[in-house]
Amino acid sequence: MAIRVVKPGMLTTVQDAGRWGYQARGVPVAGPMDLVSHRAANALVGNDRAAATLEVTLLGPELEFESERVVAVTGADFDLAVDGKPARINAPFLVASGSHLQFLKRKKGTRAYLAVSGGVTTPIVLGSRATHLVSAMGGHEGRALRAGDRLPLGPPHVNASSAHAMDAPVVPLPEGTVTLRVLRGPQADYFAADALDVLQSAPYVVGANSDRMGFRLAGPRLTHSRGADIISDATPLGVLQVPASGLPILLMADRQTAGGYPKIATVISADMSAAGQLGPGDTIAFVACTPREAMAALIAQERALMAIDA
């Protein structure tokens, strides 16, 4: 019971909820760039929320199924086809044994998530199947998929086909730009008094040298008041590190476990999936919010996800 990769796409990796609990030992978390879409895809096929999916980036793969499966694709809006016939995104559908699933034109968003009933069951490394590309850990041989790869699947769920389609994505896909809410960072006192205002003064552009580790941003430069170096400390998902250039780096799923640049702000958890749908050339407007607003946004997002899980 497996999927065979006919065409791999631009960057397709195996991702589950991430390799949590090992950052103190220098092991990165990895996992999906858009955790909400990953979780929604699993819910649509009856999987546990942490089951491994395929993360598809910009240009999608062609896959052959060795057994009949219920599958779902969420996240970036792709045209899909099963043996040449259109399939619907954000809804479960059946793929017969021997059939081919193709990702065709991408219309919006950067990353899609393909969940298969039973989940992708590549070997578990330190409690997770997530691919971390820099360390070549997890997933399928620690790398992006290639033509000819064969991905094992778990036993299919009997109730997978009873799930309902989503009326709309839980996180609206950005159309070239997105507003991300931020909280004051742990080293905000390392910056000029007006630095947080400068961060919000104009959009930042995601650079072409961005990747799953972080987005390098071009826009208003932030001025340090106490130097651009600190004693290295932990780097949570969504923090904005600012090196000596004054240009922030938004740390993403494959981020390093610790860093020595001061962190001016942190994108709130509820907005990180929208950030994960950005690609090179897209723009970000940062807006400061309160912890209360951040918590309310996360609760609302969780309620929307629970409605899919039900």
Image (tube, grey):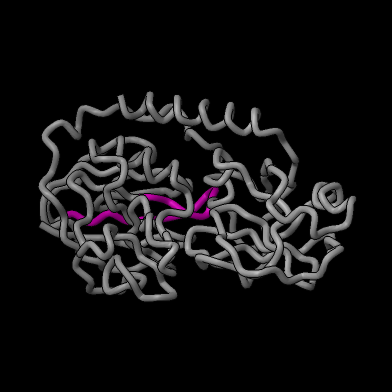
Q: Can residue 74 be seen in this view?
A: yes
Task: Please identify the quarter of the rendering in which residue 8 is found.
Answer: bottom left
Q: Which residue lies furthest to the front in this view?
A: 231
The C terminus lies in which quarter of the figure? top left
Write the residue at 38% across / 46% down: 38
Task: Please identify the quarter of the rendering in which residue 129 is found.
Answer: bottom left
Residue 115 position, x and y percent, is 29, 47
What range is drawn magenta here?
Answer: 99-113
Q: Height in image: 10 above or below 174?
A: below
Q: Height in image: 247 above or below 16?
A: below
The majority secondary structure of the magenta stretch comes to strand
Residue 160 position, x and y percent, is 19, 34
Residue 100 position, x and y percent, is 23, 56
The N terminus lies in which quarter of the figure? bottom left
Write the residue at 56% across / 46% down: 272
Q: Is residue 212 visible?
A: no
Please check the rendered image and state whether residue 101 is part of the magenta-colored stretch, yes or no: yes
Task: Please identify the quarter of the rendering in which residue 290 is found.
Answer: top right
Residue 88 position, x and y percent, is 35, 39
Give the camera-side residue of 10 and 214.
214
- Numbered-mark total: 0
Q: In this view, does 128 lie to the left or right of 275?
A: left
Q: Height in image: 63 above or below 292?
A: below
Give the camera-side residue of 112 and 25.
25
Write the residue at 70% across / 68% down: 230
Q: Is residue 158 left or right of residue 100?
A: left
